[in-house]
Amino acid sequence: MPTVEEKFDIIIIGTGLSASCFIYELIEKLEIKINLLWIGPLDTRPQTVCTWEPKSSDPWYKDFIQQKWNSWYFKFDNETISHASINYNYIAIDAQLLRKKAMSKIADFNWITRDTSSVLDVSRDNGVFTIKTPERSFLAEDVIDTRPPDYQKDSILQHFYGLKLRAKSRDFRSFPKDVCLMDFDINQEDPTGPCFIYALPFSNSEILIETTFFSKMIKNKVSYISQIRTWLKSRHNLELDDYEIIESEHGVIPMGKIIPIDDSLARLGSAGYATKTSTGYTFEYILKQTKNIIDQIHQKQHLTTYNPHPKPLAALDYIFLKVVKDNPSLMPRIFMQMALKLKPDTFVEFMSEKNTFLTSFKMIMAMPKIPFIRSLLKIGLKRNV
């Protein structure tokens, strides 16, 4: 039987990006004394996380920014739409490095305890949580759960596999300097949803290329790599074999209703609805959740999950997903319409939920109306049945 250890004020479960961001911000902003346990096996995955940042910002995570761009493009049906932002940069964050630094940072603070055990069970009795691991049990007044959630069957998934490449020789042609945000002019092999290429040129000789699907069917690795190989050849007349594979990244992001491991716990990250369901972007919403939870700690409240997405925007995302689910082939045209009709900064503000009312109105006006009206009517009828 596991032995019972000391009691903590807060236990945070999981060692991924959301937990690491929380630890970083907590160390900088905590104004009261607490005793915290950070529990979970090390997360050593290569992970590049992207978001938009105002050019004037000076964020705490600036040391982890690998590259920034102010221009990007979309491609579909042999048409290219380019954006150049006045006020925002698109930034790539080395999440693996951020997690490593968070681990090393806690060594300087005796009020944070680290345990690498896996969590077997969480229970609550008389207001006190018990966290069981294979070796021991821990007690806590509050628990923050960052473990990835499950998802409903038949959900639309954003699943991707990417390769970070470096030219093997000095005799190479440079990649374009703009981010390829979505290139739909590739083999649309999945009947349940579209796929596109996403590419980040880190330098003249180094690039991250991902094959991304919005569909119900996760592929084998060969399928993703085949799309990357074909894109390099058809778009840039380059051979994949001429590049060294530095690392690979992969992931699955539910684009609909999630199923937390334990919905009675305060949750942070994708388990706490941080992911914007229409796009998969998560990072800046983790930061909003982190700020909210730290405020709760300062106010000595019992911790609860904070959903960072305004309800009107969450409703728009739900309708968007319904359209994509009912009409998978429409997704490329929807994003191309957004790119064509929205100014670059307005597009960024929609994607990152800034200036919510005006931006949402502009986004709605840019959309093809009939599919959205049909999906809205279906949702209304379903709820009235």
Image (cartoon, rainbow, N blue to C red):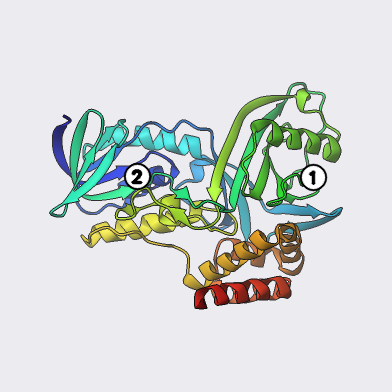
Name the residue rendered at 51%, 76% in the picture: 385
Whole-percent x, y for residue 32 in the image: 20, 53
- Tell me, yes or no, whether the two marked residues, 2 and 1, touch with CB atoms within 8 Å: no
Query: Along the polypeptide, which appears first: circle 2 or circle 1?
Result: 2
Q: Nearer the viewer, residue 215 or 39?
A: 215
Classed neighbour count for the residue bearing mark 1: other residues with Cα under 10 Å, few (<14), some (14–19), many (≥20): many
Judge whether residue 322 can be spotted in this image. yes
Classed neighbour count for the residue bearing mark 2: other residues with Cα under 10 Å, few (<14), some (14–19), many (≥20): many
Q: Nearer the viewer, residue 100 or 7?
A: 7
Which residue has dot 1 on it?
186
Q: Which of 236 and 118 is in front in this view?
A: 118
User: SS for tag 1?
Assistant: loop
Name the residue rendered at 30%, 37% in the picture: 119
Which of the image's four quarters has the N terminus?
top left
Whole-percent x, y for residue 256 in the image: 53, 57
Q: Quadrant of residue 117?
A: top left
Whole-percent x, y for residue 349 in the image: 60, 65
Q: In the picture shown, does residue 23 fall above or below 84?
A: above
Amino acid on which disc 1 is placed: Ile
Q: Residue 23 carries which label?
A: 2
Looking at the image, which residue sits at the far top? 169
Q: In the picture shown, does residue 361 fall above or below 217?
A: below
Name the residue rendered at 77%, 21% in the picture: 169
User: SS for tag 2?
Assistant: helix
Judge whether residue 33 can be spotted in this image. no
Q: In the picture shown, does residue 384 fall above or below 83?
A: below
Name the residue rendered at 74%, 47% in the picture: 178
Amino acid on which disc 2 is placed: Ile
Whole-percent x, y for residue 365 in the image: 69, 76
Q: Residue 293 carries which label?
A: none
Q: Which of 364 and 189 is in front in this view?
A: 189
